[in-house]
Structures are given as C-alpha cells and as structure tokens.
Image: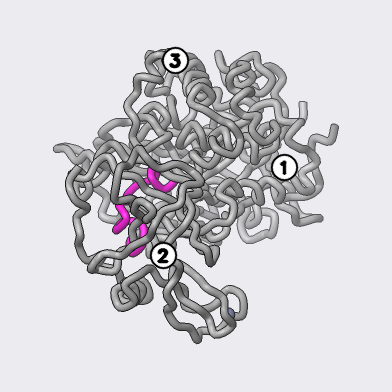
C-alpha cells in the first residue's frame, strides 16, 4: 500500500469552511452553536435551538472505533493505489461520530479500539494508531 | 383475522386503494433502448395486465431520474395529467411512490396512477457500443452534498462502503455472521431457479462458492452484493372498487409507510447504526392495516446486500433481534418454509428494478398466479424498500378469498 493520495477535497460551502478550519486548528473541528451544541457534518442551523450563529471549535483528537470496513476492491481509480484501506466510524469524547480513513495497518483495527485523529495539509481528517 | 383494514397509510376513513396491474421488462445486461423506453414497455404491460387503456391514466409517479411524468405522459397519450409526485429515497422510492399514488387516489386527486421505475443499472458503469446513454441520470438529492464533500474524500465511494459499517455493527451487536449471510444468498438462488426472468436462474450457489467469493468491502463479498441490470417495472394504483371490475381484480394496499434514519444523510453520525428507516416505516405501515408481521404469508425484502436484507427482516418484525440468521438457515425463507421470501430470487438473483420487481412478485403471489413459485394460499404479503443511506419503506398488501 502506498501513501494516501493527499488532494484538496474539493468541497463547497460549509464543508469547505470545515476543512479550512481543520487546517487552521491543526486538528479535527466541528461547529459549535451559540447554545453550546456541537454538530457535524456542517449544517446551516442548529437542530436543537434553530440558531444560525456558530463557530468552528477544536475537538479531542482521539476517539473510539464503533464500526469499520476494509475496502479491498477498487471502487474508484483515485484510491486504487492504497488498497486495502480501512474506513472507521470513530466517536470522539464530545459524542460526535465521523467516518475516517485509517492510515496504518488496515487489518489491525477492531470495534472498541482507541485511535488518534489527525488532519492532513488540506484539512482532511484521518485516523491513525493511538499515540 | 382482519384482512382488510379500514385505514390506508394511517389515514382513517378514506377510499381503500389497490394495485390493479403490474408489468415488467426482462433484465438486460446491456439494453439497446433507453430507461424511459423500458419504462414505457413496463407501463404498457401493466395496462394490459389490468385491462385498462392508456388514457385511463390520470396520475404518474416517475422515479427520481431518467424521465419525468410529462415525458411518460406524452409517450402514453395521457393528455390531461391530474397528479404527479416523485420521492427521493433511492431504492426505497418505488414503494414511497406507490404510497403517494395510494394517497392521491384515496384523496381524490387522481383515479388511476401509473407508478413506474426503470434504469440502466448495468450499463451506466459499463458503456459499450449500441447501448444508448440517457441524457438525464439519477437525480441527485441533498444527501449528495455530504457524500461528495465529506465521504468521498475519505475514500467512501459506493454503497458497499456506505453500508458496510452498518453490517459490521449488526454482526457485532447481534451475532450475525457470514454463514447467516450465505444462507440468505443461497436461498435467493434456489428461488431464482424457478423464475424464468432471473439472471441467476441457472446458477445454483454452494456455501463453498460463497465463502470463496472475494471481499469487496468487509463484510460484503461479491456474492453479498445485488445484481445490476437494465430493467423497468410498473404498477397501476386505483380504488379497490374500480379494481374489482378489472381483468385481474385488485390486490389491496392495506398499509404503507416510509421512514428515515437520523440523520438520513450521514451514516457515521448516527447514535444507533441499526435504527434503519424501515423501523419507523414498519410502525407506520402496520398501524391501522388490520394485520401485523405475524400475519404475513410471504415477503419481498429489498436485498441490495445480504446482511441488510437480514437486518430488514428484523426491523419488519418477523423475527427477534438477531434472529434473522437462524430464520435464513432454518429454511423458513424457502418455498414451503414459514415465510417464503423473495420467491422471484430478489435483487441478488433475479435482477434489480429498485425493488419494484418485488412488488410485481408479491402481487402475483397474492393473486395466486406465481406459477412454480406459488406460496399456497398466500393472502397477506409485505414488501420492504431500502435506499440512499438507509431510508426505508414498507408496503402491506392483501387479498380476500
Ligand atoms: Zn443551538
């Protein structure tokens, strides 16, 4: 397996702003509503209070694996070089859950494991072996 | 046991509706005509089945893509269309559309609604000479924003990857394993062997063959994934009263419901990965239908992936949580079992028409015209739908003998 293809995610709107915030914070972030509710993926308004006042805040850069898959067949040429790769559902301490690719031995991860979350130079978050 | 509830879709006191005609095309792998042309074939077959004229149609529910109510209307000679609606729940759209049609007829907005789906499921990723490409593909929904901007950059490109975390959580929480999935896949092949249209009709499946099938995205092997076909299917929805006088009578729509996981557009973000849309859809569809899961004589389950078909059987309520594997292994899903399921072979072994092929099969079962696949005495059936990121639909059908 070669290195993950680091490219600009090419996102738009709020999602692009999220990647930019991750770069600026050097870690995974989420929106925090003025009422204190955290949310991800990015939304225009808070599902709890309805407000559109929010800011991006850093999250705890570790989490626990709730589920996973290992992709072994090329579903897209852009990721053909990195097969097999693991995709993890990771829950951070704040309670938010993210789908993250794993940079490391895909076969080594299972449900309940703790992983570290990092971001690349484009702000794309990923999981790696816990420090 | 109550056979005909006096409610439809949870709305009391309205006209009972029925499916009066069904039609479908063969399952092509490289169709030489466009999806809209296949849909017109299916529509005409459904009209013929019902003994209705093209001009009897006054409502059309097209799928979210490939065509429009207007394009279908002008090609069918429908000059005064009174109703149209499209729901975007991916593969669950077929049953949502039947529910829309039922509500329209019950509410008086239309008297005879064509519900049709069709696509180039095989050919859109396998272009070749002589296979035309539709100008408009699947309509992208708002759920696509999170896919494009958040999931694809992670390397999550397609349905096997979107759904695999649900399946692995299902294995983890409820003890389902590959032998359970294999049992479901093999049951579909046994059903397909009796179905003339089935793509896998002459391809029996052994456990050894299943276990040797390459992994696509754990826990999904190639043989856990449904077929892809170019095909179309249609049904006609009208009132029970009108259907009664038609060529094949009517199969009554006892209940219909739709539901979505929370949030619908982000699988990873869910508090409970197993709380799929069908859980809410089933509650809504059974409420007031006069029947429950124990009354079902046969079921069509949206078997896009083996594990998800098993999970849907649990959400439908025909077995306990974690019990779907035993159900499949016991032979209950086979002809002669306690709950013959996908007697046409399903998406896994017959073909893939967004589950409308399941509706066609259940209607034939309840009419008693399912031929070699007939479930003796079938009077009540249900069809599940699955789409997008776990949206669910349920249609409950019945006949009086
Ligand atoms: Zn708020």
Mark 1 surroundings within 10 Å by alpha-carbon count, few (fewer than 14), some (14 through 19), many (20 or more): many
Residue B308 visible, this angle? yes
Locate residue B169, reporting x and y percent.
Answer: 53, 42
Q: Is residue B387 left or right of residue B161?
A: right
Q: Secondary structure at mark 1?
A: strand
Q: Which comes before the other along the chain, label 3 or label 1? A: 3
Question: Does mark 1 have its CB less than 8 Å from ligand 1?
Answer: no
Mark 3 surroundings within 10 Å by alpha-carbon count, few (fewer than 14), some (14 through 19), many (20 or more): some
Q: Residue B322: name its quadrant.
A: top right
Locate residue B370, reporting x and y percent.
Answer: 58, 21
Q: How is the image coloured?
A: one colour
Given the image, what chain letter belongs to the residue carrying mark 1?
B
Image quadrant of ligand 1?
bottom right
Residue visible at 46% across and 14% down? B193
Q: Is residue B146 above or below residue B244?
A: below
| Residue farthest to the left, as pictured | B129
Given the image, what chain letter belongs to the residue carrying mark 2?
A
Q: Is residue B186 above or below residue A67?
A: above
- Residue position for label 1: B254
- Residue position for label 2: A61
Residue visible at 54% across and 24% down? B180
| Residue farthest to the front, as pictured | A131
User: Marks 3 and 2, how far apart in space?
Assistant: 43 Å
The reply to whether the C-beta atoms of the residues labelled 3 and 1 are less than 8 Å apart is no
Q: Which residues are magenta?
A: B148-163
Does A118 lie within the magenta span?
no
Q: Say if labels 3 and 2 share a chain.
A: no
The numbered mark at residue B207 is: 3
Q: Say if labels 3 and 1 share a chain.
A: yes
Residue B74 visible, this angle? no
Q: Which of the pair B248/B138 is nearer the observer?
A: B138
């Amino acid at each position: 397996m070669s290195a993950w293809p680091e490219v600009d995610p090419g996102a738009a709107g709020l999602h692009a702003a999220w990647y930019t915030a991750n770069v600026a914070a050097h870690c995974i972030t989420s929106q925090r509503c003025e009422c204190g509710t955290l949310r991800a993926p990015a939304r225009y308004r808070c599902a709890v209070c309805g407000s559109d006042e929010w800011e991006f805040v850093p999250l705890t850069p570790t989490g626990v694996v709730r589920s996973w898959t290992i992709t072994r067949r090329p579903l897209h040429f852009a990721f053909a070089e990195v097969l097999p790769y693991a995709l993890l559902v990771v829950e951070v301490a704040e309670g938010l859950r993210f789908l993250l690719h794993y940079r490391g031995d895909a076969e080594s991860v299972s449900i309940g494991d703790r992983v570290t979350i990092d971001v690349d130079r484009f702000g794309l978050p990923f999981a790696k072996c816990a420090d | 046991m109550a056979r005909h509830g006096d409610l439809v879709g949870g709305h009391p006191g309205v006209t009972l509706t029925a499916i009066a005609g069904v039609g479908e095309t063969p399952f092509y792998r490289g169709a030489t005509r466009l999806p809209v042309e296949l849909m017109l074939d299916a529509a005409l077959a459904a009209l013929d089945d019902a003994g209705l004229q093209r001009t009897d149609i006054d409502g059309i529910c097209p799928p979210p893509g490939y065509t429009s109510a207007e394009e279908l209307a002008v090609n069918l000679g429908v000059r005064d269309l009174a109703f149209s609606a499209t729901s975007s729940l991916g593969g669950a759209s077929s049953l949502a559309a039947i529910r829309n049609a039922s509500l329209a007829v019950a509410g008086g907005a239309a008297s005879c609604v064509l519900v049709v789906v069709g696509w180039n499921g095989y050919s859109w990723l396998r272009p070749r000479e002589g296979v035309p490409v539709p100008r408009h593909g699947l309509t992208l929904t708002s759920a696509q924003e999170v896919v494009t901007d958040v999931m694809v950059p992670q390397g999550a490109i397609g349905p096997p990857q979107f759904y695999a975390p649900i399946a692995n959580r299902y294995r983890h929480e409820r003890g389902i394993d590959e032998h359970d999935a294999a049992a479901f896949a093999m049951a579909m092949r046994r059903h397909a062997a009796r179905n003339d249209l089935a793509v896998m009709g002459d391809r029996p499946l052994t456990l050894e063959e299943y276990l040797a099938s390459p992994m696509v995205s754990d826990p999904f092997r190639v043989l856990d994934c449904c077929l892809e076909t170019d095909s179309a299917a249609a049904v006609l929805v009208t009132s029970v009263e009108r259907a009664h006088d038609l060529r094949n009578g009517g199969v009554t729509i006892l209940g219909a419901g739709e539901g979505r996981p929370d949030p619908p557009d982000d699988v990873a973000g869910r508090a409970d990965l197993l709380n799929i849309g069908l859980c809410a859809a089933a509650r809504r569809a059974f409420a007031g239908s006069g029947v429950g899961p124990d009354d079902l004589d046969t079921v069509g389950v949206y078997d896009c992936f083996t594990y998800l078909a098993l999970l849907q059987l649990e959400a439908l309520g025909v077995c306990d949580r974690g019990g779907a594997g035993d159900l499949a292994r016991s032979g209950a899903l086979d002809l002669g079992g306690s709950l013959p399921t996908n007697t046409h072979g399903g998406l896994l072994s017959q073909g893939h028409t967004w589950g409308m092929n399941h509706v066609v099969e259940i209607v034939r079962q309840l009419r008693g015209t399912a031929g070699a696949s007939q479930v003796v005495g079938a009077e009540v059936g249900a069809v599940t739908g699955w789409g997008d990121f776990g949206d669910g639909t349920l249609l409950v059908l019945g006949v009086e003998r």
